[in-house]
Structure formats: C-alpha cells, structure tokens
Image (tube, helix red, strand yellow):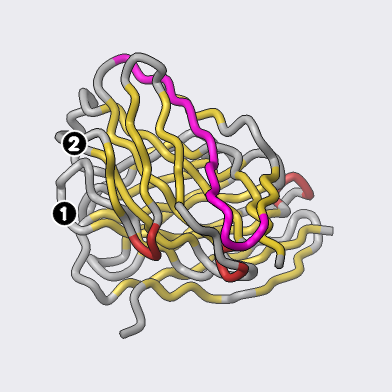
Amino acid sequence: AQSVAQPEDQVNVAEGNPLTVKCTYSVSGNPYLFWYVQYPNRGLQFLLKYITGDNLVKGSYGFEAEFNKSQTSFHLKKPSALVSDSALYFCAVRDAGDTGTASKLTFGTGTRLQVTL
Amino acid sequence: NAGVTQTPKFQVLKTGQSMTLQCAQDMNHNSMYWYRQDPGMGLRLIYYSASEGTTDKGEVPNGYNVSRLNKREFSLRLESAAPSQTSVYFCASSLTGDSNGELFFGEGSRLTVL
C-alpha cells in the first residue's frame, strides 16, 4: 500500500522569506510524486510532479520540489513567499509499479500555508 | 474552457434520502475519479473509471455507486445518505492511460447530511 505523510498542519512564513512544506512517502516500488494547491472553495490545482530524472523539479508559480530517495521525501519549496501563496497544499504519491491505466493518487492530509506581511 | 464541471455545488439531505452528483469533463480524458475531502483526512478515493465502460472501487466505496455514462460523464450516487457522508466531493479526470498523468479537479460539491 502507498501512503503520504505531511507532518505539519500549518506552516507560517513572512512574505519574502523562503518556505518549505514537508512531505514523506511510502511505496513498495518507485514513486511518482505530485504537489497540488487548493485555494478556498476551489478544487485542487496541479503544481508539479516528479516521475524520473533530475531530483529538483520546477513547477508553477515559482515552486519547486526536491526528491530525496534515501529519505523518502519530496518537500515543496519556494525561495521567496508571497501573501498570495497562502493556501492548502497537498502532496500525493503513486506507485510506479502499479501498472493500471488510471492515475490513482494517494493524498496526504494537507498543510495550510499562511504567508503574512 | 470549462474543464471539469460538477453539479450541484451545495446540497443538504436528510438521512436516508438519495441523490446523484454529476460530473462532466470536456478535455477528452479517458480516466475519471471521485474523491471525498474531510478535515484531517485529506482526499480519499471513492471510485474511479480508468476508461469508458469500466469502474472500480477506491479506498472508501461503501455507501456509494457510480456510473460512467459516456466518455465525458461520471456520476456518483448515494442511495441512502448517512451523516458520515457529509463531506466535500471532488470529481477529477486524467488524460490517458498514462499512469503518471496529473489529475484535473472540479470545484467540488459540498454535501451535508442531517
């Protein structure tokens, strides 16, 4: 079975400071990893994904994430936070060894990012 | 550019009532999904349809049924609603049989069961 842990319910950061939202995963094989963002009363929006290749993945709105296989982590980062980045962030995983044709993702419980002036 | 459209956006039911949540996508995606979102639980997969004509159970299928009406539409039915089914429901779709494809989500349907 695959699983995702987001250890922080909320992360607070001042605008202009770097931010990190943590994610660790568990799969039996190699992982496909995703980050999504949810703004209030909206659906989830895709930010970025790691499938293979470079461990540092760049995505939308200046976000990036670093895949660390030895630590089974995929932390989301941004060098300089904006107030408009305040939202709920979800990490998700899929076992690459699952050969089914649907993209069945397992999501973490979410981390609320609060960026203040 | 509608993407994934869900109806209704809000619904209040009494225990035992039935209802159907509708979902349609206009991106020619093969796979469609229903998730529920609960505080502290994240998103959990209820049912999915890998392609037109197929449906499969996800993590939390009990109390729900689904129909893949055609390639565009995937509905979720609650036959006898229970308070435990109070949640926000999200429909999603993905492009192809590519298992690493990202999901595209609708804006959600907030259901309250009294």
Could you tell me which residue is drawn at 45 percent across and 52 percent down? A78
**Going by the picture, which residue comes out furthest to the right?**
B114
Mark linked to residue B96: 1
Q: Residue furthest front?
A: A16
Q: Are marks 2 and 1 in contact (CB under 8 Å)?
A: no
Which kind of residue does numbered mark 2 sit on? Asp
Residue type highlighted by circle 1: Thr
Q: Position of residue B97 (x, y in %)?
A: 15, 47
Q: Nearer the viewer, residue A12 or B75?
A: A12
- Name the residue: 57% across, 61% down: A16
- Residue A41 in the image: above or below residue A96: below
**The one of A39 and B84 positioned closer to us in this rendering:** A39
Is B26 placed left or right of A108 in the picture?
A: left
Tally of marks: 2
Read off the magenta span: A14-28
| Element marked by disc 1 | loop
Q: Quadrant of the C terminus of chain A?
A: bottom right
- Residue B68 numbered mark, or none: none
Q: Secondary structure at mark 2?
A: loop
Point out residue A4 in the picture as x, y percentages from the top left corner.
Answer: 49, 29
Chain bearing mark 2: A
Q: Chain of mark 1?
A: B
Q: Residue at x 68, y 54 (%)?
A: B87
What residue is disc 2 on?
A54
Q: Are marks 2 and 1 on the same chain?
A: no
Q: Residues within 10 Å of mark 1 (few under 14, many from 20)?
A: some
Q: Judge left or right: residue A82 versus residue A55.
A: right
The CA span between labels 2 and 1 is 24 Å
